[in-house]
Amino acid sequence: MTQLHPVRCTDDSITAHQNSHVSSFRLTIPKDARELIISVILALSVLTNLWLWSKLHDADKDIQTQIWLRDDALTKFQQGPFADMKAHVIALELNYNQEKHK
């Protein structure tokens, strides 16, 4: 068993066995003010892009739902219980026009 010590950090030790793969992931926080400001701006940009994408996705789903409801309502109206209403309206208009011209 071999102990490997990273150059920059004395607290972290990595244990490696013979013929094994060792992967180490280290997340460091920026130390100077310029790097800190840039990282905060980058993080805010990523969060803003994710928020805008979710709003765009929701708006697209709302539009698709409205189109589906409109098409579905029109189909249900044309084929549902009011399907024969068109014939009744036309018949009433013809009767009204005939009585009007008498």
Image (tube, grey):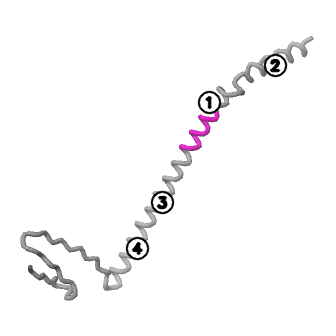
Q: Residue at x 12, y 82 (%)?
A: 3
Left or right: 6 as drawn, with respect to 59: left
Q: Calculate the distance from the C-alpha at mark 1 to the C-alpha at mark 4.
A: 51 Å
Percent coordinates x, y for residue 42 in the rendering = 38, 71
For mark 1, what is the residue? 75
Determine which of the numbered discs, if any, sits on residue 41 in the image: 4
Q: Residue at x 39, y 71 (%)?
A: 43
Disc nearest the viewer among 2 and 4: 2
Q: Is residue 21 above or below residue 96?
A: below
Percent coordinates x, y for residue 68 in the rendering = 56, 39
Q: Is residue 5 magenta?
A: no
- The kind of residue tagged 2 is Glu
Q: Nearer the viewer, residue 82 or 54?
A: 82
Disc nearest the viewer among 4 and 3: 3
For mark 3, what is the residue? 52
Dot 2 or dot 4, earlier in sequence: 4
Secondary structure beneath dot 3 equals helix
Q: Is residue 68 magenta?
A: yes
Q: Calculate the distance from the C-alpha at mark 1 to the C-alpha at mark 3.
A: 34 Å
- Tag 3–tag 2 contact (CB < 8 Å): no
Secondary structure beneath dot 2 equals helix
Q: Which residues are magenta?
A: 64-73
Disc nearest the viewer among 2 and 1: 1
Quarter of the figure that contains the C terminus: top right
- The kind of residue tagged 1 is Thr
Determine which of the numbered discs, if any, sits on residue 93 in the image: 2
